[in-house]
Every structure is written in structure tokens, then in C-alpha cells.
Amino acid sequence: MEQALEYYRKRFVELDRNGDGFLDASELDAALPLMYAKSGRDLLISLDRNSDGKLSVSEFTVIANWLFQLAKSPTQLTMTDVEKS
């Protein structure tokens, strides 16, 4: 479990291009191929737990871990996996 959390923390840092400690819709655009989503804004709306318009590292790791558990494949997550749960 700790390995998975560390993995997602590293992905968060990679996505956080401006280094402010949050992910906005434009930064989430880089995750679109992984998540099979239409836009970073769609991802933000789906994943922003406190509705502040950005994702913190804790929101990101909690959500990423939850999504990882929904995935049918250990290496790939699709929006279909999420929508079926």
C-alpha cells in the first residue's frame, strides 16, 4: 500500500507543473490518456473532493488509490472501470 501511495505522490509532483502543491484542470490534461477522460476539467470535477477547483496531493493520492482498486487491470485504469462501480 505504501508503495502505491509513493507512486501516486511522485505522479502528482510530475503533474504539478507550477509547483504550487495543487493540480488544476490544465495540469490534469496530462493525465487524460491514462484516465481516458475528455478534459482536465472533467477530471477535476470528478476528483475534487472539497470543490475548491483544484486537487491537493492528499485528494490525489486518496482518489488515485481508490481508482486503482477499481481497475480491472493492474497497469491500466479506464473511465469505464470507474463508471461501472
Image: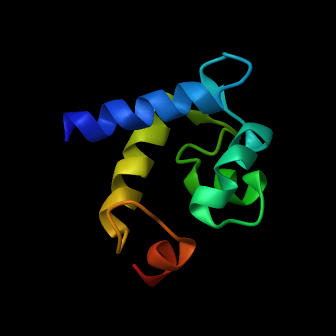
- Foreground pick, 50 / 40: 40
Residue sitting at x 66%, y 38%: 52
Residue sitting at x 41%, y 39%: 61
Q: Position of residue 71 (x, y in %)?
A: 37, 69
- Foreground pick, 15 / 74: 74
Using residue 34 as the reference point, say whether residue 37 is left or right of it: right
The colouring scheme, among rainbow, by chain, secondary structure or one colour, is rainbow
Residue sitting at x 55%, y 24%: 13
- The answer to whether residue 43 is above or below residue 16 is below
Q: Position of residue 20 (x, y in %)?
A: 67, 16
Q: Position of residue 1 (x, y in %)?
A: 19, 42
Q: Residue furthest top?
A: 19
- The answer to whether residue 41 is above or below residue 17 is below
- The answer to whether residue 13 is above or below residue 19 is below
Q: Residue furthest left?
A: 1
Using residue 67 as the reference point, say whether residue 21 is left or right of it: right
**Can you tell which quarter of the image residue 7 is in?**
top left
